[in-house]
Amino acid sequence: MPKAKYIFVTGGVSSSLGKGIIAASLAKLLQASGFSVTIQKLDPYINIDPGTLNPYEHGECFVTNDGAETDLDLGHYERFLNIPTSQANNVTTGRIYQTVINKERRGDYLGKTVQVIPHITDEIKRRIQILGQSGDYDIIITEIGGTVGDIESLPYVEAVRQLQWDLGKENALVIHLTLIPYLAAAGELKTKPTQHSVKELMQSGVSPDILVCRTERHINEGIRRKLALFCNVEKEAIIESIDANTIYDVPNLMYKEGLDKVVLKKLKLKAEREPTLTKWNKFLHKYKNPKNSVEIGLIGKYVELQDAYKSILESIGHAGAQNEIKVNIHSIHSEEITKENVSDQLKGLNGIIVAPGFGERGIEGKIETVRFARENNIPFLGICLGMQMAVIEYARNILKLKDANSTEMNPKTPFPVIDIMEEQKEVTQKGGTMRLGAWECKLDTNSKVFQAYQKDLISERHRHRYEYNNEYYKQLSAAGLKATGVNPETGLVEIVEIPTHPWFVGVQYHPEYKSTVLNPHPLFVSFIKASLKFKK
Ligand code: GLN
């Protein structure tokens, strides 16, 4: 088995520079040159995973096929690379410590004092090498969360230093992503923050092999020379990363800058071909040259923070490109929607998505939204909580089951049309205990979803505790809310539709986790198409 090579991506100067996008873009280029690549994210916080984090804290929680609740960067990795990630692709400080402490309790350390170095760093190194040892990948890119200089990043930087020493620089290289700010008053790009951040890294014994420089203006020869000289990096390894119109431009931009070439040279790897991005660029062309446009409403309660719905927004973008439609997204706060103002709030929309979510806040606005979409024949896609709201709306307004609800919102509702699963009733711990990961679903062949997927057995990812209550199945179906997708193993209803409506679909799962650039999700594609039809 050939040995896997490792690439570490660290960040300096500021957070939010887009390490995930740079890592994903590099991975894309290497993949397009014939290598098998995966990306891993190490997060320096103490939560075991982001599953228990509020979206306001951390943005969306991305879910993998194997049911890991992960950082949203894993979504980018999947969208770029078109291959699934897993539990091993996201590791947090919490998980590292948990493993070490469990080992200590078992007595594995044989009376030794357990310390950050070597025990925590060894565990970090082990986690980094798990993917490499699987034999599935030629190259593992590991993104180190946080910014160099943060106290909590220190053990990770030390682990990287040791791994470079263990494996040799030609098997493990470090890319440092940094910011070159433009000072308008001086009319100049400034390299000093980068110099300091590289110095910080060097103080920990790591000297970057490649610098990727985020910038809003082109960096010229002089700046490249300066950066090379003062940061101890070869000039060809100074890579400009200029602000892009879309994240999907970044692989091409990195290719132009020769990032993949420098990486391969330093890792002493020979590519079988130049990166071929034909399909990718076809997508980009359609994305940038739409023939039509539609207005889509995204109704949720975390709309102030775009990252909270990252995968949904990206999926809509993919579906728009596929249809050559520009999608204008209107994020609307569900708490601001009432019976009285709903028609104003949702005026002019050609399609409506009701977003996933937890807890009671904003749900009445979501229910009003569903009613509005249903009564006005506006294409509707309800995702997870959005699907549950569709069931509640139907129960209340069509079946006239007054106060029908989910037991999540009202444990005493007389009509629990959405209810907690039997096996969930015993669960007391919040972390990692929902219905998570991929489940199969059998589709009714006479349905919108079947038309969209073009097959009758699908697999989609879940993240929820509450379910459609089958005690109301007969009533709801007879009244016109059809269950068109059912879990073959458990009999749980995963999809509801109104066949008499032009396009009304609620799904208990999260289709947004599976949409990629090369495989836009069929449900979003179909929804956007229906929205254009409605517009016309
Ligand atoms: N709160 C709902 C549940 O737990 C829906 C969750 C979601 O939208 N992801 O079932």
Image: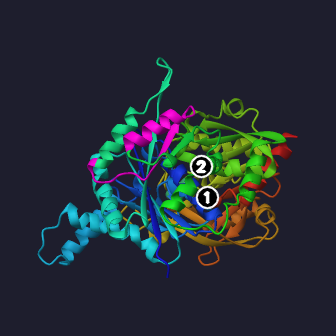
Return the residue found at the far top.
185
Tag 1 secondary structure: helix
Which coloring applies here? rainbow
Residue 32 x, y percent position in the rendering: 65, 63
Name the residue located 56 percent from the left edge and 31 percent from the top edge.
Answer: 217
User: In the image shown, does 102 or 114 lie closer to the viewer?
Assistant: 114
In the rendered structure, the answer to whether residue 528 lies left or right of residue 77 reads right
All told, the count of numbered labels is 2
How far apart are the alpha carbons under marks 1 and 2? 8 Å
Residue 419 x, y percent position in the rendering: 53, 61
Residue 139 x, y percent position in the rendering: 51, 67
Q: Which mark is residue 29?
A: 1
In the rendered structure, the answer to whether residue 335 lies left or right of residue 445 reads left
Tell me, yes or no, whether the highlighted magenta stretch contains residue 369.
no
Q: Is mark 1 within 8 Å of ligand 1?
A: no
Name the residue located 35 percent from the left edge and 41 percent from the top edge.
Answer: 197
Return the residue found at the far bottom.
1
Read off the magenta span: 203-231
Look at the numbered discs 1 and 2 and tell me whether their residues touch, using CB distance below 8 Å: yes
Amino acid identity at mark 1: Leu
Q: Is residue 536 above or below residue 271?
A: above
Q: Which mark is residue 302?
A: none
Name the residue located 37 percent from the left edge and 40 percent from the top edge.
Answer: 230
Tag 2 secondary structure: helix
